[in-house]
Image: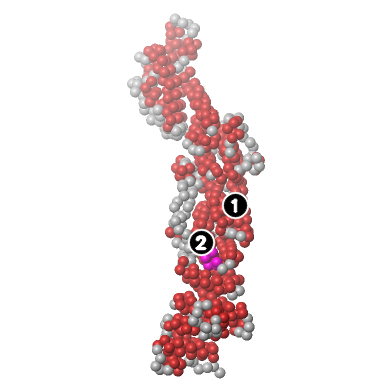
Amino acid sequence: MSAAPPPPPESAATSAGGGGGSDSDKVLAAAQHIVKSLATSKNAADDMIRILSGFDNRLSSITADLFPSPDLSSAAESPEISISSAAAFDAAEQLILLWDATPEALVFEAHEDDIAQYLTAVDVAVEHLARGGAGAGRAGVAVQLAMARLEEELRHHMVRHAVPLDPTGLCFSLRRLSLGSFDDLDFDAATPHSVDATPETARGGPLVSPFDDHAFDPVRPEAVDDLRAIADRMARAGYARELADAYCNIRRDLLDEYLSVLGVERLSIDEVQRVEWKQLNDKMKKWVQGVKTVVRVLLAGERRLCDQVLAVSDELREECFVESTKGCIMQILNFGDAVAVCPRSPEKLSRILDMYEALAEVVPEMKDLCLGSSGDGVISDVQAILDRLGEAVRGTLFEFGKVLQQESSRRAMTAGEIHPMTRYVMNYLRLLVVYSETLDGLLDDDGDESNALERPEDKDQDTEHLESMAPLGRRLLKLMCYLEANLEDKSKLYEDAALECIFSMNNLLYIVQKVKDSELGKILGDHWVRRRSGKIRQYSKSYLRISWMKTLSYLRDDVHGSGSGSGSGSGSGHSGSRMSIKEKFKNFNLSFEEIYRNQTLWKVPDPQLREELKISISENVIPAYRAFLGRYGSQVDGGRNSGKYIKYTPEDLEGQLSDLFEGSPGSANHSRRRT
């Protein structure tokens, strides 16, 4: 039969100490009555809670009287202390039972004195259990109840005081912007605006992070002491396993939430391989941002939290850090692994290199965070993913070389302009130089699969410079040779040999300019640049010879002389001579006009090359025409239909030549001669 509920505080105080006592005596008497009633019947717990609630913080004074010394374990050893060890345990047990009877209340939300007294009670119970003896069974129950409460309080306290991660407040340390990445290079529709990015825009300096000046604490600092107090008592009571499980479960869940905030998704290899490139590109960029934030912000914060909360045991501290962060780390690594085994295509190389560099950059920091043998497995996993990303880089470069060798589009550029492939490849190679240090470490021409490709001729390269080249330099030289060979094949698509020269000039000049304006120039060397500049001059001479030799032949005296050599001095001879001159003017006009119609549509995008070509043409055509016109113009001028034969002045021709290579039909309205 259960005991009756205790009387209200007033009657309890009266019965214990009389009606004339002080307020503190009454409170103490009431508390003593409550403790006695609690020992008699647990069913009275609810009534006792109601009674205690009327005392507000006076419970602290009561428990201070019940526990006169913070170190209650010394009670049994000091005969001067009025409360014996057994009495101290009795009081501690009653306080533990009292809190156990109020599951909705939380110790660590109570007054700080109440927290201190509860922790003292736990210490007494744990020590009493350790001594053994007659009261060990009761002590075991009290400790078990206290540990269950402390575990729950640990969970609640850690979640309640967790610091949220605000993505709008994060400023990630991105080293490369999307403007200069390979995903912007469109092989089929490349334009100067879409692909002519410079390494400066492609790879910016590190941005400032708000975490550079202060550390990110995943739990508010004011809660750390309470968490450490809980962890200390659970570990010393032999509940280290329960402590570790509770701690790791909470931290894992919170880290999952942080990753979600950062946009780092949990994706399988199959899911990654099914994602379209545009979406995958975005995910890879977020991964590069996320991996640095995870290691330098989240994991560093978790390391500090472990060191602070679990200071009671080095072994426990290391185990909990690895176990609580392993899921977060593996989620990061799984995406890297999925990207590494995806089908290789050139546009992914920039992002894979970004991922490789980001992971390589944080490996030393991860080694510092994952101390002891428990972290060795994590570091091995990180290194394995880093190696796979490096292999993906090498494989992607190899595939790029194959594509460049085997690209065989039969579409000729109608105006002889720069081929999209040239733009794509040159900007691709310029961006590779941005990663030169990383690529030099990854490429090994003596042992990688690139030797499966046909080795290009190095006869145009300075031997001494070639031998001193780093691995990336040798690879770039090889890719440049593939590009030049491909362009040479494409130039053969033109039926007009002069247009073939224009195409070759345009593309080779573009290549040389891209090399000279970037780090490619230092890598390939001055000798390489001089040889290609010499080729451009050869193409220019070939163009002049092929395009204008026939036209200029009509202005030569030897052709006229051979046509009128016989019958000299006769009337018929003079008439024949005049007809020959008219034919020459006529043929010259027809030839010049045909060139004008065709070559005004041709394109020479580089202004300097365009002007140099026009000047070279003028220097060959205008003096020859002016001399011929001066010698023989009088024989035609003044006769019938003279304007039919002498259609242009030298100035007219110069005006028409200025329309060449502009890529649009010429006006042909430069003639100032009257007919």
Question: Answer yes or no: do the residues labelled 1 and 2 have beta carbons within 8 Å?
Answer: no
The image position of residue 225, as x and y in percent, is 49, 69
**Up/down of 59 relative to 648, above or below:** below
Work out whether residue 37 or residue 393 is closer to the camera in this orientation and state it: 37
Q: Which residues are magenta?
A: 307-311
**Up/down of 196 relative to 330, above or below:** above
Q: CA distance from mark 1 to mark 2?
A: 24 Å
Whether the magenta-drawn stretch holds residue 591 is answered as no
Question: Which residue is under mark 1?
Answer: 386
- In the picture as drawn, the residue positioned furthest to the front comes out as 80
Q: Is residue 374 visible?
A: yes
Q: Amino acid at mark 2?
A: Gly
Residue at the (48%, 76%) spot, across then down: 116
Work out whether residue 337 or residue 295 is closer to the camera in this orientation and state it: 295
Residue at the (55%, 71%) spot, across then down: 232
The image position of residue 166, as x and y in percent, is 45, 61
- Quadrant in which the N terminus appears: bottom right
Upstream in the sequence, badge 1 or badge 2? 2
Residue at the (50%, 26%) spot, across then down: 537
Q: Amino acid at mark 1?
A: Leu
Disc 1 versus disc 2: nearer the observer:
2
Question: Which residue is under mark 2?
Answer: 301
Work out whether residue 30 or residue 638 is closer to the camera in this orientation and state it: 30
Q: Is residue 351 visible?
A: no
Q: State the predominant SS element of the stretch in magenta.
A: helix
Left or right of residue 56, residue 118 in this image: right
The image position of residue 359, as x and y in percent, is 55, 53
